[in-house]
Image (cartoon, rainbow, N blue to C red):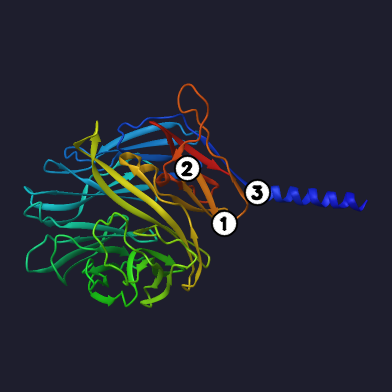
């Protein structure tokens, strides 16, 4: 009798555990082929009833036309409507796409173009409405004069974490023996100009700068400026612009040289999270083939202007390839901050044809090694989790590289091709999950196989247990819908 009761209890416990296991299932569309092998894809307006896919050429050197294609798909992953429009021209030159901002059923296309004859370098804005499936007339939202292409200045664009506004910072054209001059514009998402500011900085004018631009939810623009980036005297300053005033603060200090970072909002507080170099070894190198050293991770409170967390790598961690780390993503969940970092290197080489060098170039992209850094919101380090080793991709195969992360079922899920096919890795709690990989028949004959994912296309449906993404095998591509 006792044995029978124990057996019943065990069966009940097993049934309960199965009940708590979550199964992620995927269905896929019919295959399609790209119009051009250099096309890049993204998914927008995800809902239980479908989504809109954007595709365009990856800023190839075609000055006369830059086309954007938008296709609507229904809940059965079938194409129901498609439109195409062109980015605006200045003279005979077509604009280069810089940002696509998704907000409230609209896509804001920000592009830049310059023309010597028109003596202008400008930023254009076009707005696509998902509801009407139409595109607005172009609006020039920033511009400055140029005299020649070799000294034409450049733009940086930043979006606030709450997605309510964006900033444009322009570095004016290089002029010998003068100081650096910048112009800043901040717009809301209805393209209303909130403020504009012009400043001359206390740094020499140059043809290029090492700086990162951020926009806080408050509307304050932040510049992380690196001074003498390739010298032993390397240092960092934080510059803030609010439409009227310019303030400068020391950022780096002995043993702390900030590298790549991201602006996040933590319970209404703006913070910078990223990686740093301690400055004890060689100076940062230009185009290093091995990558530049990173010595740990940091968290910086912008409100208090205080470094609240600075943590060097653990002695138990293999750091030999944790170099040139980029911040792939940051997720904030309760009191936890999860930062995903990944080595990123870009190089090119002349292509070999029949063992002879040609004039064509191959472009090489290295992603990884990678790591998850877990802070609490006070800057305390809670853990360092190694992720994936390095992988190199050539030319258009770069679409398979890197990774994407989502908080699903209270756990951090990382999508990648780490196992040479689509993989969803789970970290930091949540229910036990089982990921059912999509199985496709890549061609009209043969057996099923598991495709590769395009990590940059992973898109969650808000408030629904649903995720869309694109996979491919060879020259065939599929839209996928994952549910649980």
Horizontal and vertical percent for residue 427?
54, 56
Q: Residue furthest right?
A: 1
Q: In the displayed structure, would residue 272 be above or below residue 323?
A: below
Could you say whether the residue bearing mark 2 is in a helix, strand or loop? strand
Labelled disc at residue 220: none
Q: Nearer the viewer, residue 82 or 11?
A: 11
Q: Residues within 10 Å of mark 1 (few under 14, many from 20)?
A: few
Compared across the picture, whether 170 is left or right of 333 comes to left
- Residue occupying the point 38% across, 32% down: 81
Q: Nearer the viewer, residue 387 or 137?
A: 387
Between the C-alphas of marks 3 and 2, the distance is: 21 Å
Horizontal and vertical percent for residue 299?
41, 70
Could you say whether the residue bearing mark 1 is in a helix, strand or loop? loop
Q: Residue furthest front?
A: 355
Q: Earlier in the sequence, mark 1 or mark 3?
A: 3
Q: Residues within 10 Å of mark 3 (few under 14, many from 20)?
A: few
Q: Residues within 10 Å of mark 2 (few under 14, many from 20)?
A: many
Compared across the picture, whether 262 is left or right of 97 comes to right
Q: Which residue is mark 2?
A: 468
Examine the rendering and report whether any part of residue 130 can be seen: no
Q: In the displayed structure, would residue 286 be above or below residue 302?
A: above
Q: Earlier in the sequence, mark 1 or mark 2?
A: 1
Q: Which residue is mark 1?
A: 410
Between the C-alphas of marks 1 and 3, the distance is: 13 Å
Q: Which residue is mark 3?
A: 21
């Amino acid at each position: 009798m006792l044995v029978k009761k124990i057996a019943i209890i065990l069966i009940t416990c097993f049934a309960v555990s199965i009940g708590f296991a979550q199964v992620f299932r995927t269905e896929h569309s019919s295959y399609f082929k790209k119009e051009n092998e250099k096309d890049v894809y993204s998914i927008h307006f995800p809902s239980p009833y479908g989504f809109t896919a954007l595709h365009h050429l990856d800023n190839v050197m075609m000055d006369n036309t830059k086309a954007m294609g938008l296709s609507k798909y229904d809940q059965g992953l079938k194409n129901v409507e498609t439109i195409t429009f062109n980015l605006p021209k200045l003279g005979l030159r077509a604009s280069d796409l810089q940002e696509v901002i998704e907000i409230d059923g609209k896509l804001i296309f920000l592009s830049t173009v310059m023309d010597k004859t028109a003596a202008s370098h400008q930023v254009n804005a076009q707005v696509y409405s998902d509801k009407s499936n139409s595109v607005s007339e172009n609006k020039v939202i920033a511009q400055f004069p140029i005299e020649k292409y070799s000294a034409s200045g450049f733009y940086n664009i930043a979006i606030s974490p709450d997605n309510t506004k964006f900033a444009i910072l322009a570095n004016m054209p290089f002029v010998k023996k003068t100081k650096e001059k910048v112009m800043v514009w901040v717009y809301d998402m209805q393209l209303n100009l909130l403020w504009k500011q012009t400043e001359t900085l206390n740094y020499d004018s140059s043809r290029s700068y090492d700086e990162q631009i951020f926009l806080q939810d408050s509307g304050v623009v932040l510049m992380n400026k690196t001074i003498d980036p390739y010298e032993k005297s390397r240092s960092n300053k934080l510059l803030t612009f609010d439409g009227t005033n310019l303030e400068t603060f020391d950022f780096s200090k002995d043993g702390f040289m900030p590298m790549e970072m991201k602006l996040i909002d933590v319970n209404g507080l703006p913070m910078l999270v990223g990686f740093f170099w301690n400055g004890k070894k060689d100076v940062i190198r230009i185009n290093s083939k091995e990558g530049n050293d990173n010595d740990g991770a940091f968290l910086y409170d912008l409100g208090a202007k205080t470094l609240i967390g600075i943590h060097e790598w653990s002695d138990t961690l293999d750091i030999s390839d944790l170099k040139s780390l980029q911040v792939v993503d940051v997720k904030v969940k309760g009191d936890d901050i999860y930062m995903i970092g990944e080595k990123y290197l870009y190089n090119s080489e002349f292509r070999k044809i029949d063992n002879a060098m040609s004039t064509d170039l191959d472009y090489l992209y290295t992603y990884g090694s990678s790591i998850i850094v877990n802070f609490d919101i006070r800057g305390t380090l809670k853990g360092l989790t190694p992720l994936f080793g390095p992988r190199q991709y050539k030319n258009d195969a770069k679409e398979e590289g890197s990774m994407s992360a989502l908080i699903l079922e209270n756990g951090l899920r990382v999508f990648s091709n780490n196992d040479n096919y689509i993989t969803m890795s789970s970290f930091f709690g949540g229910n036990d999950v089982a990921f059912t990989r999509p199985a496709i028949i890549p061609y009209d004959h043969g057996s099923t196989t598991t495709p590769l994912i395009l990590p940059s296309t992973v898109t969650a449906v808000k408030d629904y247990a649903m995720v869309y993404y694109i996979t491919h095998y060879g020259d065939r591509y599929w839209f996928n819908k994952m549910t649980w």
